Image: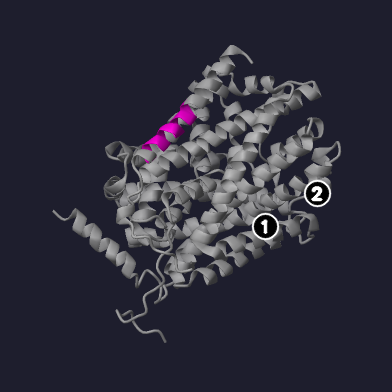
Amino acid sequence: MTPIAITMMIIAILTVWGGLALAMVNLKRHPEDEGALPEEHAPEL
Amino acid sequence: MSGPTSPGQAAPAKRETFSSRRLFILSAIGSAVGLGNIWRFPYIAYDNGGGAFLIPYLVALLTAGIPLLFLDYAVGHKFRGSAPLAYRRLHRAAEPLGWWQVLVCFVIAAYYAVIIAWSLMYTIFSFTEAWGDDAEGYFFGNFLAVAEAPGIGFTYVPSVFFPLLLVWVTVIIIMVAGIRKGISRANSILLPLLMVMFLLLVVQSLFLPGAAEGLNAFFTPDWAALADPSVWAAAYGHIFFSLSVGYGIMVTYSSYLKRRTDLTGSGMVVAFSNSGFEILAGIGVFAALGFMAQAAGTGVNDVVTQGIGLAFVAFPTIVSQAPFGGLMGVLFFGSLVFAGITSLISVLEVIVAAVQDKLGWGRVKASVVVSVLVAAVSLGLFPTATGLYLLDTSDAFVNSFGITLGALVTVVVLAWFLRKLPLLSAHLNRVSTIRMGRVWIVLVAGVVPLALIYMVANEFISKISTTYEGYPEWFVGLFGWGMAGALVVLALVLTAIPWSRSSKAHYDPEYDEVVKEDAQETAP
C-alpha cells in the first residue's frame, strides 16, 4: 500500500472506531438508572 | 357495541419494553447495519474522493445523521407510541406523517425480504459454486430467470419463491414473539454472529493477493473532490439511508425504551457502531475487489461495482477464484442474510406497532396479520420473472420520494410549523448524558432540511428528465411515481379512519401517568 493510503486508512479507523470507543466509555460511566426502573416482566413472559 | 371509554374499562396490555439499554442498542444497531453498509458504502466512498470522502462523511454524520437520529428518539420516547400515535400525540395534524412512514416500511419490507432470500440461496450455492464461470449470466439468466422486458408477470421462479417463503416464516416467528423474546433475542444472537463472520471475511480478504491494490484504490484521497457539491450531497444521502432515520424505525424502537434512559449516550454508540461497520465493509470489499482485479489482469477501477452487481456478480467471481473461496462465499452471503434479517424485523415492527396502537390489537394478532399481509405482497409480486424490474423501480422511488421526501416534510413540519424542537430538546436533555441544546435545534431546523431539499430536488430532476432506467413509461408511472404518490394518499386515508375505541389513542393509563409525571417534573 502507498503511504498516503495507509495514512488515510489509519485516520479513518482512528476517528470512527475512536468515536465508538468514546461513546462506549461515556455510556459505561453512566450506568442504567436501575433504581428508577422497577423491573417489569413483559406480559408474554 | 363498545361503550365509551370509562375508567371501568379493562386496563389494556402494558406497552412492551426492551429489558435493558444494551438490548435496545443491539437492536438499533441491527436495524441500522443492513445491506447498504456492505454493498453501498464502499462504492460511494470510492466514487466520491476515496480517503478524502471521510471528511464529508463525518461532517454529514455529525451535522445531520446523528441530530436526525435523536429527533426520532425524542419523538418515540417522549410520546411512547408507534409512528402514527407518537406524531398524533405530538400534534393532531402530524398523524399522517406517521402513516406515511408506516407505508414506506410496507413497501421496503416487501422487496427487502427478496434480497435476503437471494442471499440465502447464494450462501448454499457457495459450497458448489453453482454459478460456474459466468456469475452474471447465472444470476440474471439461470437463477432469477429475468424476463426480457419489464412488465407484470406471474411466471414464478421456484428457486426464489421457496427461500423467500422460508425468510417470511422465520421473520413471522420473530415478530409474533414480541420485543423481548423475539426482536431482542434475534438481535442478540444474529448481530454478534454477523460481526464475527464479517471480521473473518475481512481477514480472509486481506490475505488475498492484490488486496493492497484494492485498499490503495479505496483509501487514496482525491482532495479535489471536496470542492464538488455532489460529493457532499452523496455523503449526506448515504448517511440518511445508512442510519435508518426518518421513516419510523427509530421512533418505534425508542418507544419501547424505559422512561429514564440515556437517549443520546445510547444513540452515539449506535451511530458510531454503524459507521465502524461500514469502514470495515469498505476494507473487506475493496481488498476482495483488489484480488479480483489482479486475477483478471485489470485495474481496480475496472471491477468496482455496488449493490446487486457487487453481491451477486463480483463476489461469486471472487469466490470462484480465491483460495478457500467457498468459505468466503458462506461468510459474505451469510453476513448479508443476518444483516438483512435484523433490519427487516425493524422495518416490520413499524407497521406492527402502528396496527396494534390504532386497532387496539394484541401483539400476536397484529404481528400475524401484518406479517402475513406483507409476506403475501412480497411473495405475490417479487419472485417472478419480472420481479427484478419491480424491485429496482420500487426501491429507487421509495428511497427518493418515500424516505427522503418524507423525512424532509417531517422535519419541516416539526421544526418550522409546529415548532416542537425546544420541547423535544428538553426531553432529550432530561435524562441523557450528551446535551442537545441550541446547536441541535439549528442543525435539525437548518442543516438537515437544506440537505434533504437538495437531495429531493436532485432526485426529482433526474427522474423526471429521463424515464427511470429506460423502463416503459407506464411501468415507471405505475410502480414508481404512482406507488410513491399512493403512499401519501393512503396516509391521509389511514389518518381519516377513526382510532378504535380500545386503541391507545383513547385509553392509555400508562401514558397518562407519564404525562402527569412529566408535568410534575417541569412544574416550577
Neighbour class for label 1 at 10 Å: few (<14), some, many (≥20)?
Answer: some
Relative image position of residue B170 (x, y in whole percent): 64, 60
Could you tell me the amino acid type at mark 1?
Answer: Val
Q: Nearer the viewer, mark 1 or mark 2?
A: 1
Q: Could you tell me which residue is drawn at 40 percent across and 84 percent down?
A: B2
Residue B131 or A44: which is nearer the viewer? A44
User: Is B497 or B253 nearer to us in this picture?
Assistant: B253
Would residue B472 be seen by someone viewing this image from the given angle?
no
Q: Main secondary structure of the magenta part?
A: helix
Which type of secondary structure does the marked residue at label 1 adopt?
Answer: helix
Crowd rating for badge 2 (residues with CA inside 10 Å; few <14, some 14–19, many 20+): many
Q: Position of residue B335 (x, y in %)?
A: 65, 43
Residue B490 to residue A8: above or below? below
Quarter of the rendering occupied by the N terminus of chain A: top right
**Which residue corresponds to mark 2?**
B143
Point out the stretch of residues depicted in magenta. Answer: A15-27
Mark 1 or mark 2: name the one nearer the start of the chain. 2
Asked if residue A11 is positioned above or below residue B238 in the image, the reply reads above
Q: Is residue B414 visible?
A: yes
Verify whether residue B170 appears in magenta: no
Q: Which residue is mark 1?
A: B167
As helix, strand or loop, the secondary structure at mark 2 comes to helix
